[in-house]
Image: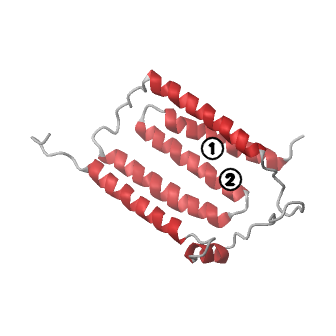
Amino acid sequence: MMSASAVVFYILSFFILATGLLAVTSRKIFRSAIWLLFSLTGIAGLYFWLQMEFVAAVQVVVYVGGIVVLIIFSIFLTQQSGKDLPAPLRSRAIFSVLAVCAGFVLTCVLLRGYVFVPAGHSGIAGTGVVDASVGNIGAQMLSTSEHGYVLPFEVISILLLAAMIGCIVIAMKPKPGDK
């Protein structure tokens, strides 16, 4: 019999995978954005379930509150926000299915070499409870050492800037007479 913790994990996992699949297969672009919002909210729920409240809050604020809202605004600013997306070509659909299958097989092959032990159990060097306190996360975000996250934090800042510039370019309507 499964524990309640395993049931919660499977429910969250199914929700994330189902809404992610709906996000990439929906024919309406606005509905795809809404399904993406639900998928990212499910990931935040997974972080809450793992008792990493700060990371879950960052997930909600940055991705759900920032990226998805930016995507939705850019959809509303385009002229074709209510139209159906074109049907994918059959060759692209076949390639996508093959890529997913190859990724699944590669993941299974890579995971076969690892032994996962619950945190706090001995037996493998380096296992232990992760310190997810706000102070520790802040110190690692500002650190330039080997385990610091300053460079990825700056890359994400550039990514957000590029997304904002892209939304402005998409939203610019061509003047009459321009091709």
Q: Quadrant of the C terminus?
A: top left
Taking depth in this image into account, of 116 and 20 the one nearest to the observer is 116
Residue in the picture at 38% in, 30% down: 84
Q: Is residue 28 left or right of residue 95?
A: left
Residue 122: image location, x then y, percent: 89, 63
Pick whichever of labels 2 and 1 is earlier in the sequence: 1
Few, some or many C-alpha atoms within 10 Å of disc 2 (few <14, some 14-19, many ≥20)? many
Residue in the picture at 18% in, 45% down: 174
Residue carrying label 2 = 46
Residue 160: image location, x then y, percent: 42, 60
Residue in the picture at 33% in, 53% down: 166
Above or below, comparing residue 55 to residue 176 in the picture: below
Gap between marks 2 and 1 measured at Cα: 9 Å
Q: Residue farthest to the left?
A: 177
Q: Quadrant of residue 125?
A: bottom right
Residue 133: image location, x then y, percent: 69, 73
Residue carrying label 1 = 16
Q: Quadrant of the N terminus?
A: top right
Q: Which element carries disc 1, helix, strand or loop?
A: helix
Disc 1 residue type (three-letter): Ile
Disc 2 residue type (three-letter): Leu
Few, some or many C-alpha atoms within 10 Å of disc 1 (few <14, some 14-19, many ≥20)? many
Q: Are marks 2 and 1 in contact (CB under 8 Å)?
A: yes
Q: Is residue 129 left or right of residue 179?
A: right
